[in-house]
Image (spheres, rainbow, N blue to C red):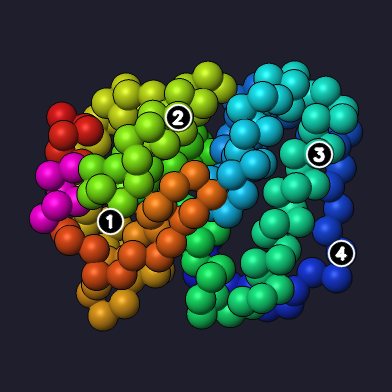
Amino acid sequence: GKNFVGLIHQPRLVLADLDLVQTLPARELRCGYAEIVKVGLIGDGEFFAWCEAHARRVLALDPEALAHAVGAAIAFKARIVEADEREAGPRALLNLGHTFAHALEAHCGYDGALLHGEAVGAGLALAFAYSAELGLCQQEDSARVQTHLESVGLGGDPRQLAGGPYQAQKLLALMAEDKKAEADDLTLILAHAIGRAFVQKSADAARLRAFLEARFT
């Protein structure tokens, strides 16, 4: 429900206080990392490769690695938002993994069992797995994403995800309520490759339901 209020003014300044980051528990750090690695998956394959090599340093709060990761993620998002302030086009790409994630969060009633970043991590893996199943990207890319997410404590078997068990039909209904949906058409953010996300409108609901049933049953 956080999007009901909306954004009234763009910020004049964004503060990224890395000392504050160091006060977070490990679970919340992993959640933040999900949003960082998402940047590479959307549009920067080289940054994803950097994440593969340096994720442990980021999560261990190595100052140099943390500053690079946070700075790269903020700069990427700033470029997208500046180019598409009202989300009429490419800004929707920032929701990679989030159509799945928001449905997972709503399914478990926002009870705290599943944190947002954990849902995003699962959603990123699901988005690439579904892209591969549709033949839109290589299975190797999906496997690479899954392997990396699991290495940092995200992704994993959807059936073991906190807040479950999850029902495919309910998840599909919740996804249909996503803010990107238009005229009852389901819109997904999928990928042609790591670093090449795209918006797929009028997604096949029956195909998606079968995919969800296979993953969550």
Kindly identify which residue carries mark 4: 13
Front label number (4 vs 2): 2
Front label number (3 vs 4): 3
Secondary structure under badge 3?
Answer: helix
Residue 115 falls left or right of residue 57? left
The amino acid at mark 1 is: Leu
The amino acid at mark 3 is: His
Mark with earlier residue (4, 2)? 4
Quarter residue 79 falls in: bottom right
For the residues marked 4 and 1, what is the alpha-carbon distance in whole angstroms?
34 Å
- Residue drawn at x 62%, y 34% is 49
Secondary structure under badge 2?
Answer: helix
Residue 122 visible to an observer of this rendering: no
Kindly identify which residue carries mark 1: 174
Give the residues drawn in magenta, as a range: 206-211
For the residues marked 2 and 3, what is the alpha-carbon distance in whole angstroms?
22 Å
Quarter residue 128 falls in: top left
The amino acid at mark 4 is: Leu
Label the magenta part by its dominant secondary structure. Answer: helix
The amino acid at mark 2 is: Arg
Number of labelled discs?
4
For the residues marked 4 and 2, what is the alpha-carbon distance in whole angstroms?
36 Å
Position in image of residue 4 (x %, y %): 50, 69
Front label number (1 vs 2): 2
Mark with earlier residue (4, 1)? 4
Quarter residue 23 falls in: top right
